[in-house]
Amino acid sequence: MAISLSVVLLLAIILVVLLRGGSIKPGPAIVAVLFGFFLASTGMAPSINRFLNSIADTINQINF
C-alpha cells in the first residue's frame, strides 16, 4: 500500500509540474487521469500492480 500511495503522489506532483509549466494542457491531463482511473478498474490492474512492485523491489535491492 505504501508503494502505490507513493507512486500516486509522485505522478500527481509530475502532473502538476507539467500543467504549471505549460508542457501539457488541462484537457489531455484530464484524459490521462480518467484513463488511469478506468484502467485501475479493469482486469489489467493486478498485472500492472505486480509489475510496478517488482520494479520497486529491484530498485530497493540495489546497493550503492
Image: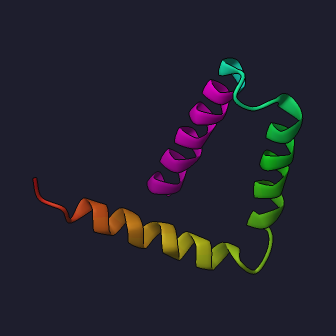
Q: In the image, is 63 to the left or to the right of 5?
A: left
Residue 13, percent from left and from top:
58, 31
Residue closest to the eye, 46 or 31: 31
Q: Tell me, what colour scheme is on the image?
A: rainbow
- Per the picture, the main secondary structure of the magenta-coloured stretch is helix
- The outermost residue toward the left is 64
Relative to 7, is 13 above or below? above
Residue 16, percent from left and from top:
66, 27
Question: In which quarter of the view is residue 19 placed?
Answer: top right
Residue closest to the eye, 29 or 40: 29
Residue 28, percent from left and from top:
84, 40
Q: Identify the residue at horizontal 65%, vertical 29% (top origin).
A: 18
Q: Identify the residue at horizontal 40%, vertical 67% (top origin).
A: 55
Residue 38, percent from left and from top:
83, 61
Q: Which residues lie in the magenta part? A: 1-18
Question: In which quarter of the view is residue 35 placed?
Answer: bottom right
The verdict on residue 47 being magenta is no
Q: Identify the residue at horizontal 66%, vertical 34% (top origin).
A: 15
Relative to 48, is 31 above or below? above
Q: In the image, is 10 to the left or to the right of 27?
A: left
Relative to 21, is 47 above or below? below
Tally the numbered discs: 0
Q: In the image, is 49 to the left or to the right of 34?
A: left
Q: Identify the residue at horizontal 18%, vertical 62% (top origin).
A: 62
The verdict on residue 11 being magenta is yes
- The outermost residue toward the front is 23
Q: In the image, is 36 to the left or to the right of 14?
A: right
